[in-house]
Image (tube, rainbow, N blue to C red):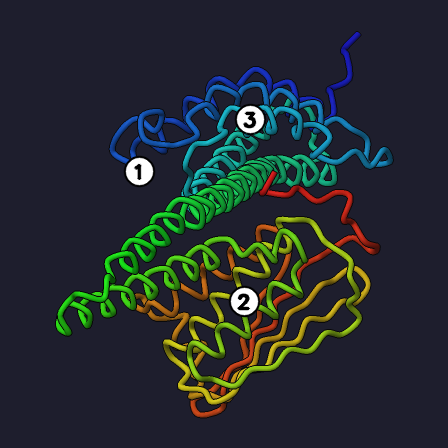
Amino acid sequence: MNQAAPTFAQFAADRLVRDRRRLTSDWVDTLSSQLGLDPRRVLPHGDLLDHLPVVLAKAADFLCVPDTEKLTAEQIITEEMRDIARLRRGQGFDVQEIIREFDELAQLLDGAALRWLDDYPGVPDAKSVGRVFGRLNRVPLLMGQITVGAIEEERNALLRQLAVAEEEERLRLSRELHDQMGQLVTALLVGLRGLRSGTESEEQSARIVELENLAARIAREVQQLALDLRPPALDNLGLAAAIENLLHEWSERNGIDADLQRIGLGDERFASEVETMLYRVTQEGLTNVVKHARAGHVGVVIERRAGTLSIILEDDGAGFDVDAVLASSQNSRRLGVRGMRERVARLGGSLEIESSPGGGTCLFIRAPVAPGSDSTERDDPSR
């Protein structure tokens, strides 16, 4: 008795398992012809090529899952793709290259499905055929999403580690400057004062006073540099106090009026990386005011609302065309804005800029924080 033909989904799943090596080879050949050389040598994710047969075998299982079970492709291939992402830890990648590769895979899977349709021994059901093509196309799409997403996550984690290392180095240098250089300059001042004997000539006395003034200036500059590298208030008193000190010193140094407002903020502390990020972005914003704005007044608002900590920095300066600056390929301000946005984005925050020529500039910096005080969870870089 003749056995009934399998459904097209079952037939396609069987063929996908049998053809997975061929599809992998076709993919490599296609990419080789495009790139002009073996993709294993140039692509930062060559290990993906080795895992592809396993992924396609899991995709074959997905083709036969009944629609009523609502089993998604992520449940079939996510585990394997995360293994791939782990293998790629620390490697560079180009998102557009990854997208192009998975587009090529989708086309190859479509071509394979058309061949299977020709070889199918029964009469294909339109619904079954549609589901096979739809799910086959879903596989490379999810492979790309999972791979790029996992690598982006690892990249952000690495950047956060670098940011922590940077702050630790800043703290070390700040202490070195304060302790070592501070002591040396103090010793220099004491030595210069010891040169005064009352018998030196008027010219010698004037020269000693000049050197004393120079040493005192060096001491002030070293102290300011140490504070800029890692302000003690940020570790000891918290974000609001650190920004208040920063704003006061910045205003005196640059001759620009400044004021600070706190809204919904008590004495609570937040995660060290959040406080550090908001402080550094505010510091960069104030630096940009001096460099570009020609402002007469700056206002800073620190606001706490539920799970968000926000800083608003507004000046009455010259302003600028935000879109034009961000579109420029050679602009130091563009690089500064991108750096600030990337620093904020690492912690799941956002940076918005409102500005227009002659209309001043306003920065809105937001970071997610725990609903309550989290001072007990701080990772103090001074430890």
Q: Gap in Å between the C-alphas at discs 1 and 3?
A: 27 Å
Q: Nearer the viewer, residue 149 or 287?
A: 287
**CA distance separating discs 1 and 2:** 46 Å
- Residue at x-position 29% and y-position 33%: 33
Q: Residue 24: in sight, yes or no?
A: yes
Most extreme residue toward the bottom, as rendered? 358
Q: Amino acid at mark 1?
A: Gln
* As drawn, 201 above or below 348: below
Q: Which residue is mark 3?
A: 86
**Residue for point 77% across, 12% down:** 3
| Closer to the camera in the image, 276 or 14 | 276
Residue 269 percent location from the top left of the image: 74, 55
- How far apart, in angstroms, are the residues tagged by discs 3 and 2? 35 Å
Q: Going 70% across and 34% down the picture, which residue do you hit?
A: 73
User: On the rendered image, what quadrant is the C terminus found in?
Assistant: top right
Read off the residue under disc 2.
Answer: 282
Label 1 residue SS? helix
**Residue on which disc 1 sits:** 34
Q: Determine the image quadrant of residue 302.
A: bottom right
Where does the N terminus fall, quadrant-wise?
top right
Q: Tell me the kind of residue under disc 3.
A: Arg
